[in-house]
Amino acid sequence: GNNNTSFQHGIRPPPALHSETLHRGAVMLRSANYDSFMMGVNQRRKQSYPVVCLYATVALFGLLVVLALRMGDTSSEPQMAQMSRQDLMATLRSVPATVRFSPGFTSSMKKGCDTSSSSLHATRQRLVPRSTEVSKREQLKQIKRQDTFNRMGFKETRPIAEKEMFDEFQSDVIKDMRDNLYTMEKGDITFRLAQDFGFCWGVERAVQMAIEAKLHYGDKTIHITNEIIHNPGVNDKMANMGIKFIPVEDGVKNFDQVEKDDVVILPAFGATLEEMQLLTERGVQIVDTTCPWVSKVWNSVDAHTKGGMTSIIHGTWSHEETIATASFAEDYIIVKTMQEAEYVANYILNGGDKAEFMEKFKNAMSKGFDPDVHLKKLGLANQTTMYKKETRAIGQMLQKTMMQKYGPEELNKHYMEFDTICDATQERQDAIHELAEDKTIDFFLIVGGWDSSNTRHLVEIPEHQGIPAYHIDRAERLRPDNSIEYRTIDGEIKVLKNLLPEGKVRIGVTSGASTPDAYVADAMNRIVLMKSSIANTESTA
């Protein structure tokens, strides 16, 4: 994308993009020396084509001979056992001339080795058994290679999309607070804003790509497999733009309405491999807005599979991101809390009631999962929005468990772990930890979707430090009668009357990674209006 423009709008690229090495590399790419070097490389490539083709043909010739001889030793096929040298040569002559070593091959080489790929493929299918074991990672790569797959956005509509993002989601109020030590005073109210909050780079990228896609495809029918992000206001915007959400019936997505040449957007937290395969087979245009941090987790579970390991995924089994991640694992089990992870660890060390285990994790494990078989080699992955300290604690506990079970010298054979916790998630958690140290704060207002995992974890931090925290998904939850409708840590929706006290009040404010600045500013403005209403009532009385 246009990174310079993106920086102005608060989009933060991954840390890797800040590398000085990449900058120097970019300068080299623009140099004349590099162009000259590449011309030489390309010339040498062309010169090497005949040699490569010669080696390939000799290898194929040898392979055919070996296979024919092996078939001659097969007792189940007596007619092949009696194959004469003349029969063998006749069989080899049946291979197309363009792929066997013959006088015709020389002319093919001179033409750049224009070997008939279809004939070669047919010959291999006939004589060489093809392995059906294709990794899920490779299947994903094959989907991404399709011309109908887009994960880069649309440059021609990007400037319009960026302006739309800026106009709707940025806030002068928030900008002023950043410039004023993240503090704002309005009458008797003091707002203190966490220093990291709101839209992360991956979320902002996903929303902008969806807008770019709508502008690019115009009147084409556009679907999205789920909420683009976990924010009701942003999803309302998608619907108002004419983007259709895939309906869910009895917990299952119904793709019947998606037709060939339609456009389907994959949301920031990704989609399952099965969904991508279905959409590819249906011939739709796919726009993939999956956050790169989520893709990083998929790489981790692929590494687990290659190592013959079971993936233990720290996440919520019903969360869209975890569902997508699990689809790229072969064997997996999902644990939501430290308590569930400890239950698994205890089973590894001491065994237990297998029926109870299977019932406990019935919705959170791969098909055919057997705790007596699949808990011997483990790899840890996580939903990127989970509480970082808990993920690390689970990792340390599992490492200790496998060390106790198999010994320190065998640990690397039985346990694997990568750091896949999203930087943005961690930064927001650290920021509210720091702000919660201010014990003069009366309560926290936390803005973000009620189904947003990262926002829910932000609520836990001040609560655990003894400061009330109220999680709202939109500004309208703050009511003119000085009440607030909010979500508790336990998921209950409650209403609190008399939110704002008389006199001065100090309020800590933060928001989840799916919440635009403008939505936070709207919530603070409502609190100011509520306080003014209280003051007017008191003066009238």
Image (tube, rainbow, N blue to C red):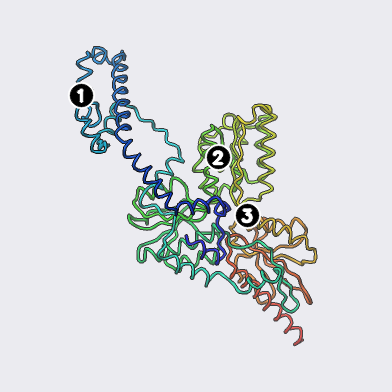
Q: Say whether marks 1 and 2 touch (CB < 8 Å).
A: no
Label disc, if present, on residue 93 of the rendered structure:
1
Tell me the kind of residue under disc 2: Met
Note whether 423 is above or below 42 in the view shown.
below
Choose mark 3 or mark 1, whichever is in front.
Answer: 1
Specify the quadrant of the image occupied by residue 521: bottom right
Q: Earlier in the sequence, mark 1 or mark 2?
A: 1
Label disc, if present, on residue 365 of the rendered structure:
2
Q: Earlier in the sequence, mark 2 or mark 3?
A: 2
Choose mark 2 or mark 3, whichever is in front.
Answer: 3
Specify the quadrant of the image occupied by residue 60: top left
Query: Label 2's element?
Result: loop
Tell me the kind of residue under disc 3: Thr
Residue 76 screen position, x and y as percent: 30, 15
Residue 322 screen position, x and y as percent: 55, 47
Choose mark 1 or mark 2, whichever is in front.
Answer: 1
Residue carrying label 3: 425
The answer to which of 356 and 97 lies nearer the viewer is 97
Q: Quadrant of the C terminus?
A: bottom right
Q: Say whether marks 2 and 3 touch (CB < 8 Å).
A: no
The reply, left or right, for residue 327 in relation to residue 132 is right
What separation in Å lies between label 1 and label 2 (alpha carbons)? 53 Å
Label disc, if present, on residue 147 of the rendered structure:
none
Query: Label 1's element?
Result: helix
The answer to which of 397 and 9 lies nearer the viewer is 9
| Label 1 CA crowd tier, 10 Å (few <14, some 14–19, many 20+) | few
